[in-house]
Amino acid sequence: MRNILAVLLLYLILLASGDNQEGSNSMPKQVKQTRQNDDIKILVQTIDDNANPLHSDFTPSVLKLSEMGIPGAKAVLDLLDAPRYETRLRAERVLEGVVMGRNGWEYGQGYTDDDGQQKTNDLLKANGSYRADAPPKERRESIEKWRQWLEAEERTDQHK
């Protein structure tokens, strides 16, 4: 429950930031992809920078990566096994934020249907109930499940 509340805060902060890239819809697809890849690289490198003083597991990079969906989640997979606990926790928040968004979470509203939170919890559990403070072996097992799920979701998204 605490994780869900933390991710709720993440989305509220995103909503309040109102970051909007005007004109991005007119860019060619290849340019958008290159720009997104560059953005992701920078966000991963800065995931530990400028932590929220009240919720240190959230940084501007955590928020932006969560907003990016599957590409953001894939980008933090290796960070889920980083040496620093804080880095692992922030990567976990990105993953949770992406899953919540895919299960109907909307800014300022919460879940759009009654099943959204249950679907989120079920998916988190099915993929090993990743915890940043779990022993390395448990983390790696969960990371591999997430890797497989993210790849499958990415393929599904490409066919939409």
Image: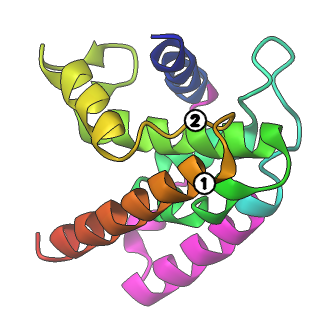
Look at the numbered disc 2 and give the secondary structure of its residue.
loop
Q: Tell me how far mark 2 sits from mark 1, CA to CA.
A: 11 Å
- At 44% from the left and 77% from the top, the residue drawn is 27
Q: Which numbered dot is residue 137?
A: 1
Give the magenta range: 17-43
Percent x, y of residue 10: 57, 25
Q: Nearer the viewer, residue 104 or 96?
A: 96
| Quadrant (top left/top right/bottom left/bottom right) for the N terminus | top left
Q: Amino acid at mark 1?
A: Lys
Q: Residue at x 73, y 39 (%)?
A: 60
Residue 54 horizontal/vertical position (percent): 80, 11
Residue 134 in view in this figure:
yes
Of marks 2 and 1, the one in the foreground: 1
Q: Residue at horizontal 38%, vertical 59%?
A: 145
Give residue 97's position: percent from left, percent from top: 46, 36
Compared to 49, does 125 lie above or below? Answer: above
**Does 152 sit above or below residue 79?**
below
Q: Considering only vertical position in the picture, is 108 above or below 152?
A: above
